[in-house]
Amino acid sequence: MRIDPATNLQPAGAPPPRNDISEALARRLRAETEGEVLFDAASRGRYATDASIYQIMPVGVLVPKTARDIATAIDIARDLKVPVLPRGGGTSQCGQTTGAALVIDNTKHLRQLLAVDVARRTATVEPGLVLDHLNAQLKPHGLWFPVDVSTSAQATLGGMAGNNSCGSRSIAYGNMVHNVLGASAWLSDGSLVDFGPIATLSARAAGIAEHVRALAVQHRAEIAARWPKVMRRVAGYNLDIFDNQSEKPYTSDGSVNLAHLLIGAEGTLAYTRSLTLRLSELPRAKVLGVVNFPTFRAAMEAAQHLVTLGPTAVELVDRTMIELSLLNPAFRTTVATALIGRPAAILLVEFSGADKAALLTKLKALVELMGDLGLPDSVVEMVDDAAQKNLWDVRKAGLNIMMSLKGDGKPVSFIEDCAVPLASLADYTDALTEVFARHGTRGTWYAHASVGTLHVRPILDMRVGGPTGGAAKMRAIAEEASALVRRYKGAFSGEHGDGLCRGEWIAWQFGPAIDEAFRSIKQQLDPIGLFNPGKIIDPPKMDDASLFRFAPPTAPRPYKRIPLTPWLDWSAWNVQADPVTEATTAPGTGGDVTGGFAMAVEMCNNNGHCRKFDAGTMCPSYRVTRDEQHLTRGRANTLRLAVSGQLGPDAFTGDAMHETMDLCVGCKGCKRDCPTGVDMARMKIEFLGHYKARHGHTLKDQLVARLPAYARVASRLPWLMNLRDTLPGAAWLSEKLLGFSARRALPTWRSDTFWRSPQTRTFVTREQAIAAAQHDGKAAVLFVDTFNGTFERENAFAAARVLQAAGYAVHTVTKAGGHHCCGRTYLASGMVDAAKARAGALLDALLPLAQAGVAIVGLEPSCLLTLRDETLVMGLGDKAVVVSKQAMMFEEFIAREAQAGRFKVSLKAAGKPILLHGHCHQKAFDAVRPILEVLKLIPDTPTELIESSCCGMAGSFGYEASHHEVSMQMAEASLLPAVRARPDTIIVADGTSCRHQIADGAQRDAVHVARLLESLLIA
Ligand SMILES: Cc1cc2nc3c(=O)[nH]c(=O)nc-3n(C[C@H](O)[C@H](O)[C@H](O)COP(=O)(O)OP(=O)(O)OC[C@H]3O[C@@H](n4cnc5c(N)ncnc54)[C@H](O)[C@@H]3O)c2cc1C
Ligand code: SF4
Ligand code: SF4
């Protein structure tokens, strides 16, 4: 590593600047910018990683509010000699977005689409704009930006330009460099320079262009000899803008565009303020041919011929992924429709254009070509759009399944985007497979066969040091892979950039002369080395363990978990996996001193998918704050740093950790949507258990948690309990003393609870329920939770009447001196032991019924679904498993029974359309679909599902004064506007808190699906 003596600016991994410098930096940023200045350890830790294996603590973080903030920050950093690292979604796989620098996060405020010129098909964007968000705005114009990276929901245009990103359809549209028309960027001297076509350049930019041109001329012979001649080459700087070497020239007319010099520069040359992009027409039609191959090699050999047909994508799915998808019930049917027998690999060959009929000719040509190649009848033709989309979803999910491997060994990305010419693809993949085998590992292959860039990640354990450790294996495999890349005249870095992982291979790829030319380019644009030092120029070794996120014991800063006795059972994560078979050891044998909790936390690989805003739940607190802290990834990173002692002693139960977990509403959106299955709702329970054990419970905690315990007595004195909302000033007092928001009315107490009602006499005894179940299966036990039972007993009786009308024997479990509860309110307050006692008693009551096969039917999603989730990890033994198998939501039960032909009632039309809001836990357990199925039983009544995230109430969350504002913002994000827009509808919402939020925010009464069905029964 070189340190520039003139500037003292240091490369990646160098020690951070002195404390007084970072303090001065923070002070000046606070004084001179409007941005958020984050210099505390936890905030810096959240910006220390990207989706690579590396971790470097930044000096500090700035979240700028305006472009002017960035310009000011660059000036201050230059004065204080602190490097600057621009950041988008932080999803890079090679470590280019980590550094001991001032990290500037563009994603919160610098995300505008500045201009669209529909006629000329161009758009100008700020760097923090996310690709999917851009394309959503372009769609009405029939346009899109076609560099369709897999991370399109979270990758920013600035980061994509920084990496020269490439999408699945690059064979048709090219990489970023082919689609950028101009850039406006700050140089390290603070000047803002426009980069664009040579003819349009200012004097400063023209000087840069001339410098690069001279280098290209000087090194012409070396460039011709050493430069990979493939489209997928993203290493180094684009010195070839003056001497094109790419299969696909950067401009259509052969002209030079200086903006292309910044593409793939990984933020090392300039800080992009805006980008002008070339847009494409949105394809109006697509067809897919799925080619089935008997051997993997046959697929690899075919790729070179398939591309001659002009497809927009040729994507590989290998046998391992096919098998994994077939094992997944959600994908089995879709995959099966694409298969002919049991192929060793499939290639998804997509054609797109303006007219479907014309594309059918292409499909026909594909079928003929495969016949010519000796594989007749090997193509499944998919013309239907929905079928195609389903199959693409499987292809994406396959990657997710692979990434969710438990244990310390993980699929590591370091040679996963080498690009080789298609004629050599089969030989290259064969040879690399042998390399893996020699090193005791294996790779699953997938992705971009069209351009010779197949993704493959060998499983390595980076925590193991020495000659058999992950780092040593990574180097050995990289060395051998590089020899293959050279043999087949490919590019070592073909998609994900150089960063820390491939920087050292730049000189290997291009030779010393071109490497020096790159240094000269850096010197020309950033002579003081301000921008992202240690990337591209003077990079560290890829296996420098001091830069690893999980550093081995031999490293200066080894990764160590601090022993901890977890409240919940995390043993399913406490395993190790075989790197070849991927078989995992028995739960609890992974050697984790935190019982598996740390290993569960470490599953987050920073891919940033939790930053998405599309349909689905994850992550409501991020959606309203856009803060890395209030994001699933931010929480997982903070937990990881805390449980490994990197945030100081006792950080796990400290204030910074509490602040980070505070806005997590426990919606379980991440449990469903995170590709690696990070379940932050469960982690929050674990955290709260430890936090409260150290700090104690507040009176508010006690009132919330123990509601099921005091509800029976309290409901005898409803007038007293309701004083809080009837006596002037009482609500205000409850906010001041207890923290309940005065802007909320609490649920209204009443004495005629479910359990006191004579109507329960219509219920059968346990023995009768079991007898009925054994007779014709038509029995159910209604689990009535505290909320429905105490405040809305009508819902429980409605459910019972609907079931009884269909001929079911309905039983309910009772308890002397109170009622049974699932323990959820205790869990939400961190009282895990009390929750366990409550849940254990409920399980005991339900067990004989579950054993006899009686369905356990619940009304409140968060309560009933506790029986399928948390009770399984509370150390309650087999009874929890037995009960979980019978536990289902009211609508899940009806949908199941209706499908079996057993549930039959006569219903009349509702008279109005239905608008359905799914509770987050229903979404997490795929229990919204059954409500839609049940609502279809209502004649002549259309139903529309609101595409909403969390309602924001989330149990007691929204009732708390400190959360009121965020809670309302969550509701306003989609739910409340959708409700207000349709005053003519019946709103169905099964969650008690969802109904309250809808009433508070939109002054509309939402009903439980049971109430709606009951009201429509024809006697
Ligand atoms: C699961 C997974 C799948 C992926 N699939 C693909 C894929 O299909 N194709 C692909 O190409 N990549 C892929 N990637 C890699 C990565 O997601 C992309 O490269 C993505 O475009 C990076 O965007 P970002 O906003 O996260 O950038 P970041 O990681 O934040 O930044 C990337 C680089 O750009 C620089 N940068 C950011 N903003 C600026 C700015 N304003 N000025 C100057 N420099 C800036 C940064 O300093 C950094 O060096 C994948 C990654 C993961 C984890
Ligand atoms: S929490 Fe999940 S979705 Fe978010 S970055 Fe981590 S692994 Fe990705
Ligand atoms: S549980 Fe919900 S709020 Fe919490 S991190 Fe997951 S998605 Fe975000």
Image (spheres, rainbow, N blue to C red):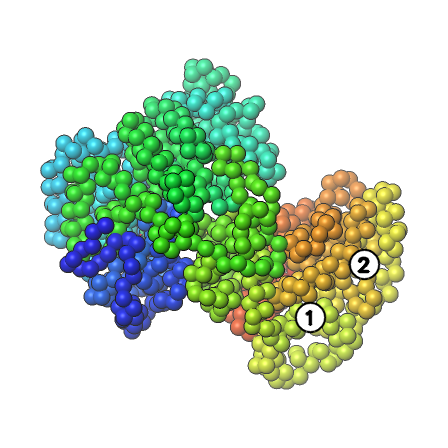
Give the residue displayed 29% in from the left and 26% down from the top: 487
Residue 430, by quadrant, is top left
Residue 29 appears in the figure:
no
Q: Is residue 815 left or right of residue 366?
A: right
Q: Which residue is mark 2?
A: 813
Density class for disc 2 (Cα within 10 Å; few <14, some 14-19, many ≥20) is some
Query: If you read the primary sequence from the N terminus, does the residue marked by circle 1 or circle 2 appear first?
Result: 1
Density class for disc 1 (Cα within 10 Å; few <14, some 14-19, many ≥20) is some
Label 2 element class: loop
Where 162 sits versus 362, above or below?
below
Q: Which residue is mark 1?
A: 706
Q: Amino acid at mark 1?
A: Arg
Q: Which residue is more in the foreground, 460 or 901?
A: 460
Label 1 element class: loop
x, y percent for residue 567: 61, 60
Q: Which residue is more in the foreground, 329 or 1017?
A: 329
Task: In the rendered structure, find residue 853 and report the number of the disc placed on it.
Answer: none
Q: Which residue is more in the foreground, 585 or 894?
A: 585
Q: Which residue is more in the foreground, 747 or 354?
A: 747
Give the residue displayed 58% in from the left and 59% down from the top: 565
x, y percent for residue 599: 52, 51
Q: Is residue 786 left or right of residue 630?
A: right
Give the residue displayed 80% in from the left and 70% down from the top: 752
Give the residue displayed 41% in from the left and 27% down from the top: 434
Residue 999, by quadrant, is bottom right
Q: Amino acid at mark 2?
A: Val
